[in-house]
Image: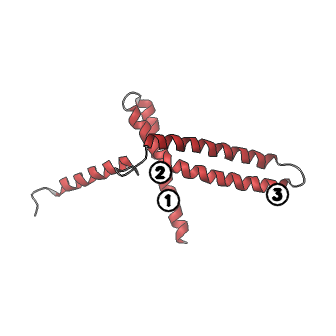
Amino acid sequence: MSEKPFLTDIKTIRERARAHMEKGVITESYGADLEQVLKVLNEALATELVCVLRYKRHYYTASGIHAPIAAEEFLEHAQQEQEHADQIAERIASDSYREIVNWLGNGDSATRRMMEGIQAQEEEHADDMLCLLERVGGD
């Protein structure tokens, strides 16, 4: 039997797990410029959201004899653009909030706490969606 108490081993395991969790999907083998990737993804997200709004506006304002057909096409495009936005946001949301929390540090504790709350809720949303997809996929 080892001389180390079992509790120390668990503590070490937890510390390693926390260190990996804080890194998220970004590991030592990540080859891109993370700051630039986040900038580009945020710009792409903004573009997708603008497209959603445009298609929705066209959906609601379509007129004329072919309005129902056109409106359905606009709605389909809006839904597809929203899916794109969701995919991009899922990729950047948690990491962006984590970066903001770390950047704020103790310099603005109120804003940091607010961002920690948002980050926690975003992580909860991701967990909820994963559980939902697992349940739906199992049927």
Residue 2 locus on image (x, y percent): 11, 61
Residue 106 locus on image (x, y percent): 36, 30
Does dot 2 land on a helix, a strand or a loop?
Answer: helix
Disc 1 from disc 3: Cα separation: 34 Å
**Residue behind mark 3:** 69
Q: Residues within 10 Å of mark 1 (few under 14, many from 20)?
A: few
Q: Residue sitting at 53 percent across and 44 percent down?
A: 41
Q: Residue sitting at 50 percent across and 50 percent down?
A: 91
Residue 90 locus on image (x, y percent): 52, 50
Q: Quadrant of residue 95 in the image?
A: top left
Q: Is residue 71 above or below residue 103?
A: below
Instruction: Work out whether residue 117 can be spotted.
Output: no
Q: Is 24 left or right of 135, judged from the image as shown?
A: left
Depth check: 22 or 28 in front? 28
Does dot 1 land on a helix, a strand or a loop?
Answer: helix
Total labels: the figure holds 3
**Residue behind mark 2:** 124
Residue 116 locus on image (x, y percent): 43, 40
**Residue behind mark 1:** 130
Q: Amino acid at mark 3?
A: Ile
Q: Amino acid at mark 2?
A: Glu
Sequence-first disc among 1 and 3: 3
Q: Is 133 left or right of 32, judged from the image as shown?
A: right
Q: Amino acid at mark 1?
A: Leu
Q: Is residue 39 above or below residue 6?
A: above
Look at the image and name its color scheme: secondary structure
Q: Nearer the viewer, mark 1 or mark 3?
A: 3
Q: Residue sitting at 46 percent across and 41 percent down?
A: 96
Q: Is 65 left or right of 39, judged from the image as shown?
A: right
Q: Residues within 10 Å of mark 3 (few under 14, many from 20)?
A: few
